[in-house]
Image: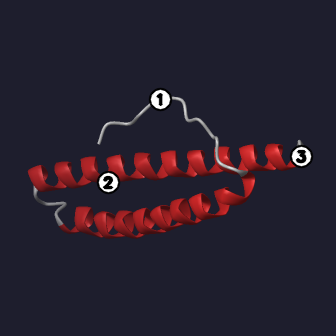
Amino acid sequence: MKPSYKPIVLDAEPGETNLILKEIDDLIAGAEVRIERQQAYARSVASDLEGSTKAITDLERMTSALDMLKRQRARIVRWEQGSVGNH
């Protein structure tokens, strides 16, 4: 999965962001569970160089995606707080 660096347009109504934040929270929770499983898998294949290299690469990719989701969630929360403050 290649990260996207396109600017995000936050054009939802402030009340609509709760649903978006819920979906992001669900994605974050799922990613955290997958990362935990991947960490266990990486430890289990530690003696297999090729398998462990792939497992670590996958783990780094998942961790990067999780960090991106958390940053996007924080941006939405800041945007919503700014929108509420301006109304």
> Label 1 belongs to which residue?
6
Q: Is residue 45 left or right of residue 25?
A: left
Identified at 73% across, 59% down, the residue is 15
For disc 1, the neighbor class at 10 Å (few under 14, some 14 to 19, many from 20) is few
Secondary structure under the numbered disc 3 in the rendered image: loop
Horizontal and vertical percent position of residue 84: 84, 50
Q: Amino acid at mark 3?
A: His
Identified at 75% across, 49% down, the residue is 80
**For the image shown, how many numbered marks are present on the structure?**
3
Q: Amino acid at mark 1?
A: Lys
Q: Earlier in the sequence, mark 1 or mark 2?
A: 1
Q: In the rendered view, would you say 40 is above or below 14?
A: below
Q: Amino acid at mark 2?
A: Leu
> Label 3 belongs to which residue?
87
Res 59 label: 2
Q: Quadrant of residue 2?
A: top left
3D distance between C-alphas at marks 1 and 3:
28 Å
3D distance between C-alphas at marks 1 and 2:
24 Å
* Quadrant into which the N terminus falls: top left
Viewer-side residue, 11 vs 39: 11
Q: Earlier in the sequence, mark 3 or mark 2?
A: 2
Horizontal and vertical percent position of residue 75: 66, 43
Q: Is residue 64 left or right of residue 37?
A: right
Res 65 label: none
> Of circles 3 and 2, which is in front?
3
Secondary structure under the numbered disc 1 in the rendered image: loop
Identified at 58% across, 45% down, the residue is 71
For disc 2, the neighbor class at 10 Å (few under 14, some 14 to 19, many from 20) is many
Horizontal and vertical percent position of residue 63: 41, 51
Q: Earlier in the sequence, mark 1 or mark 3?
A: 1
